């Protein structure tokens, strides 16, 4: 068995950050494989799944809405239900919300502008596959690039998620109008995660920031543990 | 059987798109107090009766056409 844990990066029609995700995960020690949306199964020994950014299905209907019925989502749901780490980045976050795997929904940014810049985010919860290499309160600089990244939950749901510790990352500056400045959330079990910032674009300080590597390396750690625990 | 779904942003939820449309209309000289932008879906449904069509479209709305967190929907079925 390979010492590199296998991480599946889903590719939908319109995904466009899949290659950066594959490259970044590979550089961080994963055996990262692209998996086309029409597949009915994930590759053998898949230890984690990443849903990358982009504009799946042209953002038709609502961002992320149409991807929920893709073939590959069935095994992803199975992996998620079995406690496997699943990460949605940007459009992947939108897909996981629309699929009901994560709470809330991503709406058009409050000021209607496409936000494309580095933002500072704060780690609210360090005990997830994504944030396990971080400390609570740690600030990271990671780029965002989205027009519909305004996370929304009504007051009751938002309060419930705050109380349950399901807010994983929060913007440390004004970004897009998200309720509670939420930048990333997780499911109740903490193994399914979504965030709007793009850690795969921040794995080399030469390109501005290496902070994204902290997050993705955590995911690779989690995939490695899962692979060794189940094989 | 023909059916139409109207999807609207839920009341009380900020609709930045509607706000921008309102601003534009006002600039054109229209006295518009508010605008909210939704979506319309025309469907051709395989169904025996309008009741059956409505029941199917209702499920479509719940599963895909509307997101209940932020949108409300209204269904019109031809012949009802």
Image: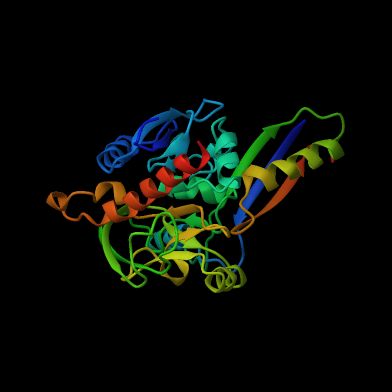
Q: Answer above or below: position of B49 versus B39.
A: above
Q: Is residue B19 above or below residue A28?
A: below
Residue A186's x, y, as percent? 50, 58
Residue nearest the viewer, comparing B43 with A183: A183
Relative to A63, does residue A111 appear above or below in the rendering? below
- Identify the residue shown where x is 44% and y is 45%: A92
Examine the image and state in which quarter residue B71 appears.
bottom right
Residue A166 coordinates in the image, percent (x, y): 51, 65
Based on the displayed image, in which of its 4 quarters is residue B72 positioned? bottom right
Residue B36 sits above or below residue A162 on the image: above
- From the top left corner, tell me how far across and down residue A23 is, in percent: 27, 37
The quadrant holding residue A14 is: top left
Q: Tell me the residue at 48%/56% (across/down).
A: A107
Tell me the residue at 80%/36% (across/down).
Answer: B53
**The one of A89 and A192 positioned closer to us in this rendering:** A192
**Residue most extreme to the left:** A206
Can the viewer see residue A209?
A: yes
Q: Could you tell me if residue A116 is visible in this image?
A: no
Q: Is residue A178 left or right of residue A209?
A: right
């Amino acid at each position: 068995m390979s010492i590199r844990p296998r991480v599946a990066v889903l590719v939908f029609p319109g995904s466009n950050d899949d290659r950066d995700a594959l490259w970044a995960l590979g550089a961080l020690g994963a055996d990262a494989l692209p998996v086309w949306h029409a597949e009915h199964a994930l590759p053998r020994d898949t230890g984690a799944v990443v849903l990358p950014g982009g504009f799946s299905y042209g953002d038709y209907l609502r961002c992320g809405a149409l991807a929920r019925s893709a073939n590959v989502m069935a095994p992803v749901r199975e992996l998620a239900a079995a406690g496997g780490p699943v990460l949605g980045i940007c459009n992947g976050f939108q897909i996981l919300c629309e699929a009901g795997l994560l709470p809330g929904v991503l709406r058009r940014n409050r000021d209607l502008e496409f936000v494309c810049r580095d933002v500072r985010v704060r780690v609210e919860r360090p005990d997830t596959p994504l944030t396990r290499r971080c400390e609570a309160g740690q600030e990271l600089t990671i780029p965002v690039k989205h027009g519909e990244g305004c996370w929304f939950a009504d007051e009751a749901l938002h309060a419930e998620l705050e109380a349950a510790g399901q807010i994983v990352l929060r913007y440390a500056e004004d970004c897009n109008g998200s309720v509670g400045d939420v930048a990333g959330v997780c499911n109740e079990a903490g193994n399914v995660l979504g965030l709007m910032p793009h850690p795969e674009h921040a794995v080399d300080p030469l390109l501005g920031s290496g902070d994204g590597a902290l997050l993705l390396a955590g995911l690779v750690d989690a995939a490695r543990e899962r692979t060794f625990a189940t094989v | 059987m023909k059916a139409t779904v109207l999807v609207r942003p839920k009341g009380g939820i900020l609709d930045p798109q509607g706000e921008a449309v309102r601003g534009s209309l006002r600039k054109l000289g229209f006295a518009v107090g508010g605008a909210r932008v939704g979506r319309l879906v025309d469907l051709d449904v395989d169904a025996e009766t309008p009741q059956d069509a409505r029941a199917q479209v209702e499920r479509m709305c719940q599963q895909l056409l509307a997101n209940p967190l932020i949108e409300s929907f209204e269904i019109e079925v031809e012949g009802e």
